[in-house]
Image (cartoon, rainbow, N blue to C red):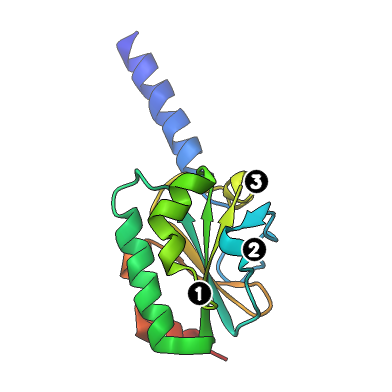
């Protein structure tokens, strides 16, 4: 009986893992459904945009945003970052309020975006081109300037 339960749990785990995210490299990603923007700063068009899924208690969440801030500062208008969160505005303002700029914006109320992208694991981010096609995805802290520059049109 223990083997049956073990097999059942393993099977369910595999099914959950295969549906961990709904992003396919080269295909369009879901349109953003965020409710509001921290500080009223909305994203602007850029050759590349990076969607960062943020959960402050998550291991490395603040380091990931700091890494993205450095990357966007190095690349300038070539890369814009959109941090998506489901957390209360007061929490996000305290943690990320000073980081908001024309290159890095924060979307509040992004519950539907987490669901539409199928995000189950943090840190997670998606690099997209101007036509909203996924170019790269994974752990944000592994994203490099070289990877981003190779993705530029």
Q: Is residue 127 above or below residue 151?
A: above
Q: Is residue 72 above or below residue 33?
A: below
* Residue 85 screen position, x and y as percent: 52, 50
Left or right: residue 140 compared with residue 84: left
Label 2 element class: loop
Chain-order first, disc 2 or disc 1: 2
Q: Are marks 3 and 2 in contact (CB under 8 Å)?
A: no
Q: What residue sits 34% from the left and 43% below the top?
A: 57
Residue bearing the label numbered 2: 29
Label 3 element class: helix
Q: Nearer the viewer, residue 50 or 102?
A: 102
Q: Nearer the viewer, mark 2 or mark 1?
A: 1
Q: CA distance from mark 2 to mark 1?
A: 24 Å
Chain-order first, disc 1 or disc 3: 1
Q: What residue sits 40% from the left and 24% below the top?
A: 9
Q: Nearer the viewer, mark 3 or mark 2?
A: 3
Residue bearing the label numbered 1: 101
Q: Nearer the viewer, residue 13 or 47?
A: 47
Q: What residue sits 39% from the left and 71% below the top?
A: 68
Specify few, some or many for label 2: CA neighbours under 10 Å numbering under 14, 14-19, or 20 or more: some
Q: CA distance from mark 3 to mark 2?
A: 13 Å
Q: CA distance from mark 1 to mark 3?
A: 24 Å
- Quarter where residue 106 is shown: bottom right
Residue bearing the label numbered 3: 112
* Residue 4 screen position, x and y as percent: 38, 15
Q: Nearer the viewer, residue 88 or 138?
A: 88
Label 1 element class: loop
Q: What residue sits 66% from the left and 72% below the top?
A: 132
* Residue 60 screen position, x and y as percent: 29, 54
Q: Nearer the viewer, residue 134 or 43?
A: 43
Specify few, some or many for label 1: CA neighbours under 10 Å numbering under 14, 14-19, or 20 or more: some
Q: Is residue 11 above or below residue 131?
A: above
């Amino acid at each position: 009986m223990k083997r049956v339960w073990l097999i059942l749990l393993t099977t369910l785990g595999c099914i959950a893992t295969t549906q961990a995210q709904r992003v396919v490299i080269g295909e369009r990603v879901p349109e953003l459904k965020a409710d509001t923007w921290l500080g009223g700063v909305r994203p602007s068009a850029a050759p590349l945009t990076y969607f960062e899924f943020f959960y402050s208690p998550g291991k490395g969440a603040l380091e990931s945003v700091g890494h993205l801030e450095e990357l966007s500062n190095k690349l300038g208008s070539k890369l814009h970052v959109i941090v998506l969160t489901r957390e209360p505005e007061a929490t996000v303002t305290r943690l990320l309020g000073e980081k908001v700029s024309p290159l890095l914006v924060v979307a509040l109320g992004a519950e539907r975006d987490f669901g539409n992208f199928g995000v189950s694991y943090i840190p997670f981010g998606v690099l997209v081109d101007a036509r909203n096609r996924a170019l790269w995805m994974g752990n944000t802290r592994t994203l490099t300037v070289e990877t981003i520059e190779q993705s530029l049109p």
